Image: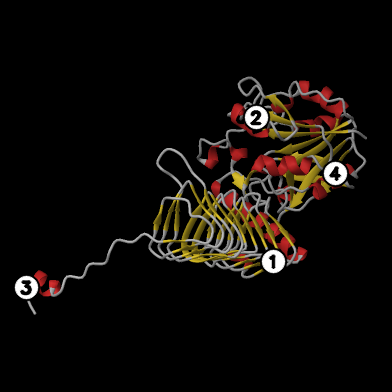
């Protein structure tokens, strides 16, 4: 049967205590809505987001995700049922998800598609269901949903609660959504009301028991942190099963879009951000890699590789920062800044070397050829080209191109004033 997926993402998320729309808060490098859209699209291409609060901001983010958007009339039709007022689908079934469930997986959602029923409803077993409405199930059918305040003593013993995800035949949505009422304490239109409507008319409503962790809703910064912790565990487990060695994985942070190839080792307290690719490399402790490509190299400890860098067959040591640079076969052992640079094989960068790439208005490139030795505490003032087989003497401030085979040196003459210490302090 054909399928449409609808993701409800119109809420304010007031408990997040942030002006940012709830679904744009990030989990492992990507907004919550990205995660759920990514999983939903594994089930089919017909995905619609129902937007409301800060709709333009959310729409701007999702414009490249290949989904449709619709606007909920929050003033006149608030609530989960109100979100589907006016929604139309040509598919035979509609899967209704929530935009604040970033941990849900396509594998879990496929369970809904395997059940034959007019409505399939996700339910979760909780050790402590206090505070939740109970789902009453008899003979593999959902009988009703009972709010805790309305439940009998027997119903309060029930440990199954609503997961907030539904698979509904489109013909029933078309019939029941217009019939929803907001005659309740919150004056909202509830999607859950169609369960009672369907049961009264003899339609089948079946439960699917789902994993509590995967269907966790994020409603606060605390929830956000817990969800991120779960996502990080998944990301690192996947990487380790792929063959990546991760030391003290609980201390390592890896964004969802980062990737690994070949034999890689990640030491403790490493942060890997964005679409970083690490191939056959060793990332040592307390290093940070952002939106870069690392191949056959060792990085760190305590190194920072900033966005746009490509590092191949190189050693980047402690307290070295690289930004938007291409290094191939380079050694930079410690205490160095290499920004907007292209450096070729066999080149050694000494301690304290800085590429001066910014003049306060524009950025400029530093190009260094093969087999160049750059002495410690040198400043390379871009734009500059250093050709192959060059020595830059320690302490040099370089502001001119250097031809192949040369040495460049720039130092003030050393002056020694005899007995100055005694004159200065007035004693000997």
Query: Which residue does the image show at 80% across and 47% down from the upper left?
Result: 106
The outermost residue toward the bottom is: 428
For label 1, the residue is: 264
Local crowd size for mark 1, using a 10 Å CA cut-off: few (<14), some (14–19), many (≥20)? many
Tell me which label, 2 or 3, sits earlier in the chain.
Answer: 2
For label 3, the residue is: 426
Local crowd size for mark 3, using a 10 Å CA cut-off: few (<14), some (14–19), many (≥20)? few
- In this view, 181 is above or below 297: above
Tell me which label, 1 or 3, sits earlier in the chain.
Answer: 1
For label 4, the residue is: 112
Quote the CA–CA distance across marks 1 and 3.
Answer: 62 Å
Query: Which residue does the image show at 77% across and 20% down from the upper left?
Result: 178
Tell me which label, 1 or 2, sits earlier in the chain.
Answer: 2
Tell me which label, 4 or 1, sits earlier in the chain.
Answer: 4
Return the x and y of residue 410 as percentages of the image width and height.
36, 59
Query: Which residue does the image show at 78% across and 40% down from the upper left?
Result: 40
Return the x and y of residue 375 as percentages of the image width and height.
45, 65
Q: Secondary structure at mark 3?
A: loop
* Image quarter of residue 26: top right
Quarter of the rendering occupied by the N terminus:
top right
In the image, taking residue 147 as reference, residue 88 lies left or right, namely right
Return the x and y of residue 195 as percentages of the image width and height.
80, 34
Determine whether label 2 and label 4 are within 8 Å by CB.
Answer: no
Quote the CA–CA distance across marks 1 and 2.
Answer: 38 Å
Q: Secondary structure at mark 4?
A: helix
Q: Nearer the viewer, residue 394 or 330?
A: 394
For label 2, the residue is: 59
């Amino acid at each position: 049967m054909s399928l449409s997926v609808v993701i409800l993402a119109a809420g304010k998320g007031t408990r997040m205590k942030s002006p940012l729309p709830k679904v744009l808060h990030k989990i492992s490098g990507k907004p919550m809505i990205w995660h759920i859209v990514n999983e939903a699209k594994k089930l089919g291409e017909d995905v619609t987001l129902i937007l409301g609060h800060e709709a333009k901001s959310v729409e701007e983010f999702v414009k490249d995700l290949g989904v449709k958007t619709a606007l909920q009339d929050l003033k006149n039709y608030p609530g989960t049922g109100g979100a589907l007022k006016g929604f139309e689908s040509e598919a035979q079934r509609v899967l209704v998800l929530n935009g604040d469930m970033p941990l849900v997986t396509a594998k879990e959602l496929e369970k809904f598609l395997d059940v034959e029923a007019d409505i399939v409803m996700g339910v979760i077993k909780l050790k402590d269901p206090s505070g939740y409405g109970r789902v009453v199930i008899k003979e593999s059918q959902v009988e009703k949903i009972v709010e805790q305040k309305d439940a009998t003593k027997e119903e309060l013993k029930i440990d199954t609660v609503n997961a907030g995800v539904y698979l509904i035949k489109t013909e029933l949505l078309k019939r029941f959504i217009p019939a929803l009422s907001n005659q309740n304490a919150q004056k909202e239109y509830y999607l859950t009301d169609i369960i009672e409507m369907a049961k009264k008319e003899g339609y089948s409503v079946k439960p699917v028991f789902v994993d509590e962790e995967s269907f966790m809703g994020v409603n606060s910064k605390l929830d956000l942190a817990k969800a991120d912790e779960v996502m990080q565990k998944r990301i690192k487990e996947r990487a380790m099963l792929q063959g990546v060695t991760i030391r003290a994985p609980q201390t390592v942070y890896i964004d969802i879009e980062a990737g690994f190839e070949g034999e890689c080792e990640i030491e403790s307290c490493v942060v890997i951000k964005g679409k970083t690719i690490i191939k056959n490399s060793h990332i040592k402790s307390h290093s940070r890699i952002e939106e870069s490509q690392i191949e056959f190299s060792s990085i760190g400890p305590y190194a920072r590789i900033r966005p746009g860098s490509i590092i191949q067959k190189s050693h980047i040591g402690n307290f070295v920062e690289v930004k938007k640079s291409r290094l191939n076969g380079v050694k930079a052992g410690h205490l160095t800044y290499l920004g907007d640079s292209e450096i070729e094989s066999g080149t050694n960068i000494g301690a304290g070397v800085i590429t001066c790439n910014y003049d306060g208005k524009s950025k400029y490139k530093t190009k260094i050829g093969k087999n160049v030795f750059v002495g410690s505490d040198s400043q390379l003032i871009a734009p500059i080209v250093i050709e192959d087989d060059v020595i830059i003497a320690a302490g040099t401030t370089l502001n001119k191109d250097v031809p192949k085979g040369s040495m460049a040196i720039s130092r003030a003459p050393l002056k020694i004033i005899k007995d100055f210490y005694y004159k200065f302090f007035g004693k000997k």
